[in-house]
Amino acid sequence: MAKMMPSSLAVFNSNDIYPISADSTMPFQQHRDIFYLSGVDQEESILVLFPNAVEEKHREILFLKETNDHIAVWEGEKLTKKKALETSGIKTVYWIQEFDKILKELTAQSDTIYYNTNEHYRAFVDTETREARFIKVTKDKYPAHNIAKSNIILQRLRSIKDPIELDLIQLACNITENGMRRVLNFVKPGVMEFEIEAEYIHEFLCNRSNGFAYTPIIASGNNANVLHYIENNQECKDGDLILMDVGAEYANYSSDMTRTIPVNGKFTKRQRDVYDAVNRVKNEATKMLIPGTLWKEYHIEVGNLMTSELLGLGLLDKTAVKNEDPDCPAYKKYFMHGTSHHIGLDTHDYGILWEPMKANMVFTVEPGIYIPEEGFGIRLEDDVVIQESGEPFNLMRNIPIEAEEIEELMN
C-alpha cells in the first residue's frame, strides 16, 4: 500500500477452479499474489486495498465465498469471517455477493485502479483468468478511472524474501533432500523412470508436502537431452545416467533441484569428466550471486566459464569460439538454457531482471552440458539465498552432489 499512488485502490482475485471434462476439475491452486498479500488459500476470494478510503474499515477488505453447512459437508470447511481475520489480519470481511456494490462505492472515492496483470517474463496465458475477466468488466464499467499496474510493485516485494519465507523454502529443500536420498538407495539397472518419480512423491507426501513444485523430469540416457522431458516412461539401463529435475512444494513455496546420477552407481571416466566440469561451473557461478549483480551480465560470465570447460572437454575448439556469433555463442550448442531464475511461491518466481540483485533474493543455479551424440546430458542445480555480504547461502547444501558421495551412497 505504501507504494500505491494517492487516491488509488488495488484489487486482487483468486484463481478459478479449472475444468477438465464432464464434472472433473483440476485441483485448486491459489493465485500466488492474493496468497502472498493475505494468506487466503481458497477459491472465489478477492482482496481490495484502498489506503485513502474515507472509512478506515475499507482500507483493507476481503471478499469470500459465503460458507454454510451444506458446503462444509460436500467440500470441507471454508473460511468464516472469524477464521479469515485469524488467517489474514484483515478485519473487514464481506461475502463475495456484496463485491459489486462495495466496489462501486469505493470507486467513487478513487481516481486510479490497480489491475493485477501477469507480466512475468515467461508468462504465456491462453486461458482467460478470473483476473482477466474482472479487468475487462471493470474497465467497461469505470472508463473514467486511471489505470495502474500492481505487478511491478509485487515483483519487487515478492522477490526479496522474508525470514519466514526463507524458512519455508528451506523446509521444501529438506523434503527434496529426503526424496533424493531415498532414490539413491533405490536406483539400479532395469528400474523405470516412473518408478523413480513414485519414490520421490512417496517421500514428499510422507513429509507433508502437497507434492511436486512442478512437473518432474526423470530423464535417463538420451532423454536428458530433451530439456523439458516429462514422459518419464522409459527403462533406466546399465551404463546410462539419469537426470532428475525434481522439487518438493511446502506451504505453497517451491524448491527446485537437479541431480544427475549413474544408473549402475558408477560414473564412466567420460561421464565423470563432464560431471565435474558442470559442477565446477555451478560452484563458480554461485559465487557471482551477490548484491549488485546484473542478471544479464551474470549470464555472460557464466557463458565464459562454460566455454572454458567445453574447450577442456574437447567439445569446442578455439576456432569455433573465435568465430562465434556474439548473439549465439559457441557454448550454446551444449548449454542452451539460462543458469539462474528466481524461486519462491512460484518455481519461476517474481523478480525484475534488469534491476540489480539484492540480499534475500533466492535463485537457482543450474548449469548443464548436453551431448546427444554421446547419449547423455548432465545438469546440476541448487537453490541459494543472496547474502548482504559474502557468498550465497545454499539451501541444498546437504543434498549429495559430489560424484564420490553419490557413488558411495549408491553402493
Image (cartoon, helix red, strand yellow):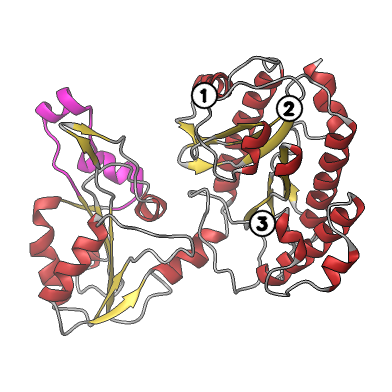
> Along the line of sight, which residue is nearer the eye, 161 or 317?
317
* Percent coordinates x, y for residue 354 in the rendering: 59, 74
Residue type highlighted by circle 1: Ile
Say which label, 1 or 3, has the lower sequence index: 1
Q: Quadrant of residue 71?
A: top left
**Mark 3, other Cα within 10 Å: few <14 / some 14–19 / many ≥20:** some
Per the image, is 150 magenta? no
Determine the secondary structure under disc 1. Answer: helix
Disc marking residue 201? 1
What amino acid is labelled 2 in the image?
Asp
User: Which image quarter is the N terminus in?
Assistant: bottom left
Chain part drawn in magenta: 64-90
Q: Is residue 117 above or below residue 193?
A: below
Residue in the picture at 74% in, 42% down: 373
Splitting the image into 4 quarters, where does residue 300 fall? bottom right
Residue drawn 9% across the image and 52% down it = 97
> Is 275 displayed left or right of 27 in the figure?
right
- The vertical placement of 317 against 406, above or below, is below
Point out the image quarter for the C terminus. top right
Q: Which residue is mark 3?
A: 336
Q: Residues within 10 Å of mark 1 (few under 14, many from 20)?
A: many
The residue at the far front in this view is: 373
Q: Which residue is mark 2?
A: 240
> For mark 2, does the 10 Å Cα neighbourhood hold few (<14), some (14 to 19), or many (20 or more) residues?
many
Q: Is residue 61 visible?
A: no
| Residue lying at 29% horizontally and 46% vertically, measured from the top left | 85
Q: Is residue 335 above or below residue 156?
A: above
